[in-house]
Image: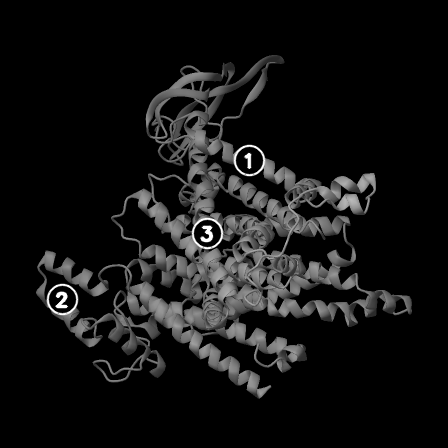
């Protein structure tokens, strides 16, 4: 019916329309009625206390990502040959009833010849205070600048393995912090791939309709009926073995994104179809708004919030997917460090029994996945601020 | 009903055909194949007798032909070197790694996979329905919060690690060895009552681990559905007219909320099968999971292809069953016609 309209534009008064002028609203409602939809969403999201807390936790995690070299007390590749499979050292504040500040007790290693195990005994006589803003292991910041400044460092001539060490004597805490960089970006990059694909295919299906819609719908159905993991396995097995770890990283991300888009595409399509019938679109059409204006100003802002919410909810499955693939040895490979790669070392029963701290990388995985879930739930509720 | 069934069957066949092409394409993605890798290796060692055998196998299975011909031969719509013998004819190919027909390699693993997945589906339904009813009828009670919390943990914990940890603690606390699906002494033995008992006791942990995330998702969805129904006026009316709380609940809102629940089996199945593949690897269950991993790593194409197809068929049939159940429950879908 748009095409049937005469080319002469309908007259629209250029001065902004003020609904309060014709029909006064109560003072208590006024800010509500005048707020933009993004502001309304923010108000609604803010009411969701758990979601706000989750968003804060995620913010902290993502703030670590750019500065892992500075925050980690050790370099991720630093091997401490004298401290292999050392258990976690606990952080203390008071020594013999006296406040000293954060410190650790040193421990010495001996070899239990009966069980062939290293035994670590804690020396409780002298506290070793840890240092802040200090010089420690050298690193290349972002692979560019040589530096050695750390936020926290182990005591002078001492060690600080707050989460223990692995089979090469590398500090687990530092490796988890370095792993955050890969594990947290893989979800976001993967979702960007799947977001682009979902927006493209879903938009195509919803906008063009007809046989294109039909073909895309069938494609979505087939992809959704396939179990993800065997496909991930098959696709990752197809990545050439001689690729560099960085290429493998991008390969895995693209694989994760390639299989995730159908859900988003379906959401885009159904939203597009539903919104096209809404009164405000009709109103805009009648007022002579162009097609681009309707899409850009009315349709996209309306379903973008939904899309962001559902994208947030599918990031966890990507993080878990990467963890599972790396755990099986088909995902990322050392020297790239991700939480999945770290868990790969805890694959056997000996790890659970003798070195349970190697399982610790599971904690950040669970925290991040939960936080994304809670935040996604909050966003989904907030995405529809008028209900 | 029969027209509905026929239409669904046709869609299923088309879906499987496309999936088979996709599977074949993915398997062929890595350069080279098992036999040419082996020949290169043997040539380096200078063993000509084995090379001749490998080259014979290449001819036998038509691996020297173009990929699309190989695909058509594999599914059995084009005559290969041995005439029509592909998946459609029940010939599942040859496993180069094990040097045995694929049938013999997978053998028991097929129906054990089926058994594990069936157990998980039953577990999820038996556990999540009562919990969901409880949490929906007593919204914001302590029990509701506990169920929600466990649900979230279930969603966030990677199943393989849970499996590993349970494997250790079950052994330590109860002395049960839960690796494998039956005690080692029964391996290769005929199926006796004792072996079945051993199988059932070994099934508990895998079912729990694989089913946890699915249960969590189901509880969440069912609770939301039920809460929606409980807010509707017909329920209020039914209660106001003096219908007992249990009857009022089970007769109307519960049945309504079951509807999306069954539709969800279709979405659940792919995740379950993914989970079972992963957990099988950790718990070394004799299902198709571990075989698939090794076949993919060594490019044993017929074995990997067959297992991927098997898993896909399992999912598609599961979705068909869920669609049929839904159509039986809800006449609107059965009569709906084109959509």
Report the front residue among A54 and A343.
A54
Q: How many marks on residues?
A: 3
**Which label lies toward us, 1 or 3?**
1
Q: Can see residue A282? A: yes
Q: Secondary structure at mark 2?
A: helix
**Which label lies toward us, 1 or 2?**
1
Q: Which residue is mark 3?
A: A321
Q: Which residue is mark 2?
A: B50
Judge from the rendering whether residue B128 lies leftward or rightward of residue A234; answer left or right.
Answer: right
Q: Secondary structure at mark 3?
A: helix
Judge from the rendering whether residue B31 lies leftward or rightward of residue B311; answer left or right.
Answer: left
Q: Position of residue A25 (x, y in %)?
A: 81, 44
Q: Position of residue A356 (x, y in %)?
A: 48, 39
The image shows residue A39, relative to residue A73, as above or below, that is: below
What residue is drawn where x is 49% and y is 22%?
A122
Report the front residue among A302 and B263.
A302
For the residues labelled 3 and 2, the Cα–Cα distance comes to: 40 Å
**Sooner in the amino-acid sequence: mark 1 or mark 3:** 1
- For the C terminus of chain B, give its image quadrant: bottom right
Q: Secondary structure at mark 1?
A: helix
Q: Position of residue A266 (x, y in %)?
A: 53, 62
Q: Which label was assigned to residue A59?
A: 1
Report the front residue among B149 and B18.
B18
For the residues labelled 1 and 2, the Cα–Cα distance comes to: 60 Å
**Chain letter of the residue beneath label 2 in the structure image:** B
Report the front residue among B323 and A176.
B323
For the residues labelled 1 and 3, the Cα–Cα distance comes to: 22 Å
């Amino acid at each position: 019916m748009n095409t049937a309209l005469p080319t002469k534009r309908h007259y629209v008064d250029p001065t902004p329309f003020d609904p309060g002028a014709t029909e006064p609203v109560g003072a208590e409602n006024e800010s509500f009625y005048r707020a933009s939809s993004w502001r309304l969403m923010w108000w609604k999201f803010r009411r969701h206390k758990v979601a706000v807390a989750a968003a804060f936790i995620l913010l902290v995690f993502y703030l670590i990502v750019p500065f892992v070299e500075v925050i980690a007390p050790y370099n991720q590749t630093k091997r401490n040959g004298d401290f292999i499979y050392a258990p976690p050292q606990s952080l203390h504040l008071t020594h013999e009833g006296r406040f000293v500040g954060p410190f650790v007790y040193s421990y010495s290693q001996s070899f239990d010849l009966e069980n062939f195990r290293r035994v670590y005994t804690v020396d409780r006589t002298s506290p070793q205070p840890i240092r802040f803003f200090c010089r420690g292991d050298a690193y290349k910041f972002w692979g560019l600048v040589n530096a050695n400044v750390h936020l926290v460092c182990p005591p002078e001539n001492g060690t600080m393995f707050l989460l223990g060490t692995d089979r090469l004597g590398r500090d687990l805490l530092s490796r988890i912090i370095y792993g955050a960089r890969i594990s947290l970006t893989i979800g976001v990059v993967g979702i960007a791939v799947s977001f682009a694909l979902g927006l493209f295919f879903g938009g195509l299906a919803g906008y063009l309709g007809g046989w294109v819609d039909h073909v895309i719908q069938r494609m979505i159905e087939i992809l959704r009926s396939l179990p993800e993991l065997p496909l991930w396995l098959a696709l990752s097995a197809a990545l050439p073995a001689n690729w560099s770890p960085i290429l493998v990283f991008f390969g895995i991300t693209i694989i994760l994104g390639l299989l995730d888009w159908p859900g988003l595409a379906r959401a885009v399509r159904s939203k597009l179809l539903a919104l096209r019938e809404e009164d405000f679109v009709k109103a805009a059409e009648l007022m002579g708004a162009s097609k681009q204006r309707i899409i850009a100003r009315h349709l996209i802002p309306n379903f973008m919030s939904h899309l962001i919410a559902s994208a947030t909810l599918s990031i966890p499955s990507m993080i878990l997917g990467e963890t599972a693939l790396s755990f099986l040895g088909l995902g990322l490979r050392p020297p790239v460090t991700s939480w999945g790669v770290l868990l790969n070392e805890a694959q056997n029963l000996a790890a659970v029994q003798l070195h349970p701290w190697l399982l610790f990388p599971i904690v950040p995985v669970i925290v991040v996945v939960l936080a994304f879930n809670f935040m996604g739930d909050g966003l989904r509720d907030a995405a529809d601020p008028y209900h | 009903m029969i027209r509905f069934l026929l239409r669904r069957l046709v869609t299923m066949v088309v879906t499987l055909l496309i999936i088979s092409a996709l599977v074949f394409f993915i398997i062929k993605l890595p350069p080279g194949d098992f036999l040419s890798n082996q020949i290169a290796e043997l040539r380096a060692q200078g063993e000509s007798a084995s090379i001749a055998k490998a080259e014979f196998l290449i001819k036998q299975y038509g691996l020297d032909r173009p990929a699309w011909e190989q695909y058509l031969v594999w599914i059995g719509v084009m005559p290969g070197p041995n005439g029509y013998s592909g998946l459609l004819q029940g010939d599942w190919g040859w496993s180069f790694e094990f040097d045995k027909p694929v049938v013999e390699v997978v053998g028991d693993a097929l129906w054990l996979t089926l058994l594990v997945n069936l157990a998980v589906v039953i577990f999820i339904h038996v556990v999540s329905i009562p919990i969901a009813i409880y949490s929906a009828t007593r919204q914001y009670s302590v029990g509701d919060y506990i169920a929600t919390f466990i649900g979230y943990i279930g969603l966030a914990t990677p199943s393989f690690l849970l499996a590993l940890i349970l494997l250790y603690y079950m052994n330590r606390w109860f002395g049960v060895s839960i690796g494998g699906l039956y005690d080692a002494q029964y391996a290769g033995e005929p199926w006796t009552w004792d072996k079945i008992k051993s199988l059932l006791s070994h099934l508990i942990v895998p079912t729990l681990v694989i089913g946890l995330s699915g249960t969590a998702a189901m509880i969440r969805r069912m609770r939301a559905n039920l809460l929606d129904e409980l807010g509707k006026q017909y329920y209020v009316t039914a209660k106001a007219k003096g219908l007992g709380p249990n009857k009022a609940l089970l007769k109307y809102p519960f049945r309504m909320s079951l509807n999306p629940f069954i539709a969800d089996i279709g979405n659940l199945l792919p995740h379950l099968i993914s989970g079972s593949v992963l957990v099988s690897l950790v718990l070394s269950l004799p299902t198709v999971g571990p075989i698939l991993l090794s076949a993919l790593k060594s490019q044993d194409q017929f074995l990997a292809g067959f297992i991927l197809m098997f898993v896909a068929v399992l999912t598609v049939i599961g979705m068909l069953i869920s669609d049929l159940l839904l159509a039986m429950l809800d006449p609107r879908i059965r009569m709906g016609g084109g959509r």
